[in-house]
Amino acid sequence: MEQTIDFENGDKYIGEVSGNYMHGKGRLILKEGLIYEGTFENGVLVGKGKIVYPNGAVYEGDVRIGDGKEDKFKGKGKMTMPDGQVYEGEFGNGILTGKGTITQGDIKYTGDVVNGNMIGQGKLEFEGGQIYEGTFDATGLVQGTITYTNGNTYDGELKNLKPNGKGTMTYSGNKYTGDFVDGLREGKGIYTFENGTTYEGDFKNDMFDGFGKIINVEGGGYMGTFLAGNFHGKGVYTYPTGEVLDGSFENGVPIGNAVVTLPTGVKKKCHFDKGVIKYDE
């Protein structure tokens, strides 16, 4: 039979009792607004229960409250925060710790949680389909994989959910392995095109920039300096037919004086006029 107990300190209990104890199904309303609801045993809320906080947060799950020994929920449960964030999984000492899920709007994390934070191995998913998976610490995902909505994938070191450090990015058949800074190719690396042609060298702001080497799958290539993705400065270009041009380039176009070495080994001096080769007499 349901009864109401008004305590001297202002708390109130509504529910089943046994003798002088809260015992059975009931609800304990504390004067500060905290509400405990569930099954009581000799004054202790145990088993599955519900806790409603004054700020609107709600916990549902395993509880043991009232005996002064384990006065916090512990086990498996679900906490819904006023801002809509939901914590679901294992709790210890009133905090999500262990395996769990954290959902905020269109973002969902599944994996290891320490004191309510994503720490350990886990997966972070966005509604649009982008997925981050790997090792998380207090700063975020630091090592793992990204699956982008366009089909690109990344595997390596990260910072602020962006490639940062050593890693490999695969784009629609092309692949880059090397250094990243803030999501961009920056430093040393190797870029392999879908047809097998490769570039190995310096990168800056996501482009070939600095010293590098291109080896074309059909033969020939280039070794020298690059600027913003183009041959620029001193370089040696080898044609698929075997001729070798040693000279200078500007925005991908040969300029000035140069030397061409024929497949026979004969060297011929030349110069370029608006990209057109002219051999010296």
Image: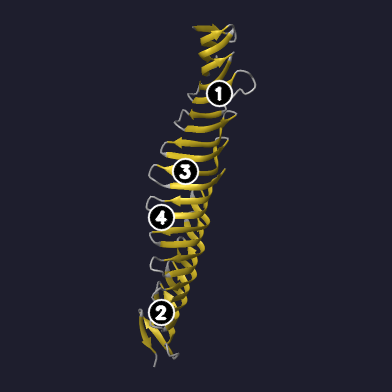
Residue ID for mark 4: 152
Residue ID for mark 2: 255
Asked which secondary structure carries label 3, the reply is: strand
Q: Nearer the viewer, mark 4 or mark 1?
A: 1
Q: What is the distance, in whole Å, between disc 4 and disc 3 at their CAs?
A: 17 Å
Residue 10 in view: no
Residue 249 position in % (x across, y down): 43, 76
Asked which secondary structure carries label 4, the reply is: loop
Residue ID for mark 3: 124
Which of disc 3 and disc 2 is earlier in sequence? 3
Q: What is the distance, in whole Å, between disc 4 and disc 1 at their CAs?
A: 45 Å
Residue 151 position in % (x across, y down): 38, 53
**On residue 63, which mark appears?**
1
Q: To which quarter of the image does residue 103 belong?
A: top left
Callout 4 amino acid: Asn
10 Å crowding of disc 2: few (<14), some (14-19), many (20+): many
